[in-house]
Image (cartoon, rainbow, N blue to C red):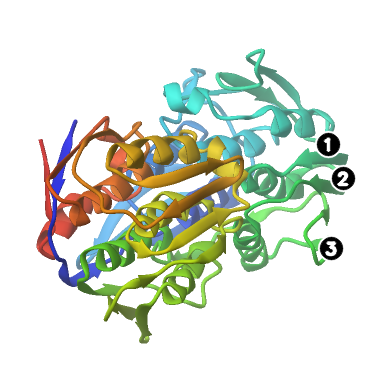
């Protein structure tokens, strides 16, 4: 699939769908719970459907109902007793979050459970998580590179382990699984990244009544063993990572948008992106359940932005930085290289095709304000790169064609439709 976009000015309202990170955490907890959990406003996307299908194969019963226009998933959990109903490899598509969390949870039983996914998922690092689980008594089988396809067999026993926190998903996997271990677990973490996502997981554990202790810097956790998950009811918050693209479109095109459903009290790290944009001169007027975003003059440059807590924002921030007056450094985000693709290298290469002045760094990039022009660019089947390049095209002269754009449905299936409604020149071709 390809996407075509060209210069335009957006104006109107956008309603942000549920958070992928929250939805997958909710599905993971509901899988292990005793009784029926109710998820309101879940994100329906490729990644969450992959997770939903997986938990059904692991023994959960799922039904879908509507309260008016509002979607509700009802999930009858397994009470921590996982089974592999089909005895086949469970396909998780492109969902790295599902792969990491479900690998940990699959290690709590004594049945061999196998996972695989698409080519992108097969390239995601799993070695640190596999090693950490093995230290807790789990038997694992993976490729020589420590990636999927992989299989795990528990039970997880507890004890002491160490893990490299190059992605917060490794840590979240252990935090969700070790409460079900036979004994207490001590987790020691090196190279911590993406702290807000760890804090999001801790909020879920608090909500579910799971007992643990941790150091203030999140470098060590002690998890009480032999716990269980209870059924719950929860409304999934809207996704700040998705909201970033509306904010970016207003910045790039000089338009004004009202972005609905965002809760600034939520733990999502990407809410910080709104602060980044204010530093660049955007007006961000927050109301109860929405925010108005627009600019009255130029975007300011000559600033440095630490993206360690917000790596998913890198593609959009790289695009908007091209439209700023001056130089912007996006740094301290080496883990952006370990997402669906190497996002630092990919955004540098593709934005240069559009005329951007970019210097690639080991942990980020330096971007000078540039006049972008349309070009044929590669979306790498990475949803955030695809959407970011589409936004870039909305401010560039000429026409931009994005190839390898199928993965746009991973987190925001209605991206094209929603942006057409606010005047964006964008279409699927």
User: Nearer the viewer's eye, disc 3 or disc 2?
Assistant: 3
Q: Position of residue 25 (x, y in %)?
A: 53, 52
Assign a secondary structure to mark 1: loop
Q: Please tell me the numbered disc located at residue 157.
A: 1
Say which residue appears at 59% left-offset and 57% top-offset: 197
Q: Which residue is mark 3?
A: 215
Q: On the picture, is 218 further left or further right than 347?
A: right
Q: Is residue 11 above or below residue 358?
A: below
User: Quick check: marks 1 and 2 in contact, CB under 8 Å?
Assistant: yes
Say which residue appears at 61% left-offset and 45% top-offset: 363
Q: Nearer the viewer, residue 287 or 7?
A: 7
Q: Which residue is mark 2?
A: 183
Q: Give the alpha-carbon distance from disc 3 to disc 2, as whole Å.
A: 20 Å
Work out whether mark 1 precedes mark 2 in sequence or the reverse, and give the earlier one: 1
Say which residue appears at 63% left-offset and 14% top-offset: 143
Q: Is residue 145 above or below residue 285?
A: above
Q: Is residue 112 visible?
A: no
Say which residue appears at 51% left-offset and 69% top-offset: 272
Q: Is residue 22 visible?
A: yes
Q: Residues within 10 Å of mark 1 (few under 14, many from 20)?
A: many
Q: Give the alpha-carbon distance from disc 3 to disc 1, as whole Å.
A: 23 Å
User: Nearer the viewer's eye, disc 3 or disc 1?
Assistant: 3
Give the position of the C terminus as an image quadrant: top left
Q: Position of residue 192 (x, y in %)?
A: 73, 50
Q: Give the alpha-carbon distance from disc 1 to disc 2, as whole Å.
A: 6 Å
Q: On the picture, is 52 further left or further right than 81?
A: left
User: Quick check: marks 3 and 2 in contact, CB under 8 Å?
Assistant: no
């Amino acid at each position: 699939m390809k996407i075509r976009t060209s210069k335009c000015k957006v104006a109107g309202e956008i309603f942000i769908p549920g958070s992928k990170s929250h939805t997958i955490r909710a599905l993971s907890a509901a899988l292990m719970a005793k009784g029926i959990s109710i998820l309101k406003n879940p994100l329906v996307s490729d990644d969450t459907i992959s997770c939903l299908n997986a938990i059904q194969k692991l023994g959960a019963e799922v039904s879908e109902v509507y309260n008016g226009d509002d979607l509700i998933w009802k999930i009858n959990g397994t009470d921590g007793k996982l089974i592999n109903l089909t005895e086949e490899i469970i396909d998780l598509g492109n969902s790295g979050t599902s792969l990491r969390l479900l690998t940990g949870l699959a290690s709590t039983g004594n049945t061999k459970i196998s996972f695989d996914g698409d080519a992108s998922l097969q390239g995601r690092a799993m070695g640190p998580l596999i090693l950490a689980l093995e230290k807790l008594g789990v038997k694992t089988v993976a490729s020589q590179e420590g990636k999927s396809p992989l299989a795990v067999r528990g039970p997880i026993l507890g004890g002491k382990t160490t893990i490299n926190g190059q992605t917060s998903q490794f840590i979240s996997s252990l935090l969700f699984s070790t409460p079900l271990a036979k004994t207490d677990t001590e987790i020691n973490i090196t190279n911590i990244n993406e702290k807000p996502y760890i804090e999001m997981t801790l909020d879920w554990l608090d909500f579910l009544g799971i007992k643990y202790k941790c150091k203030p810097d999140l470098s060590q956790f002690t998890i009480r063993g032999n716990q269980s998950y209870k059924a719950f009811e929860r409304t999934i918050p809207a996704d700040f990572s998705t909201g970033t693209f509306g904010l970016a479109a207003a910045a790039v095109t000089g338009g004004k948008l009202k972005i609905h459903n965002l809760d600034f009290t939520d733990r999502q790290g990407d809410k910080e992106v709104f602060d980044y944009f204010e530093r660049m001169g955007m007006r961000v007027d927050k109301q109860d359940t929405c925010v108005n975003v627009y600019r009255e003059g130029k975007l300011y440059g000559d600033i440095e932005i630490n993206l360690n807590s917000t790596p998913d924002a890198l593609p959009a921030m790289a695009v908007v930085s091209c439209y700023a007056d001056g130089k912007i450094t996006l740094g301290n985000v080496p883990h952006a290289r370990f997402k669906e693709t190497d996002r630092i290298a990919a955004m540098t290469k593709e934005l240069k095709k559009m005329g951007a002045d970019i210097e690639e760094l080991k942990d980020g990039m330096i971007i000078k304000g540039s006049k972008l022009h349309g070009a044929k660019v590669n979306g790498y089947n990475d949803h955030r790169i695809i959407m970011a390049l589409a936004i870039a095209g909305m401010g560039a002269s000429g026409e931009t064609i994005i190839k390898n754009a199928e993965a746009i449905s991973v987190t925001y299936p209605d991206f094209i439709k929603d942006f057409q409604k606010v005047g964006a020149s964008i279409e699927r071709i």
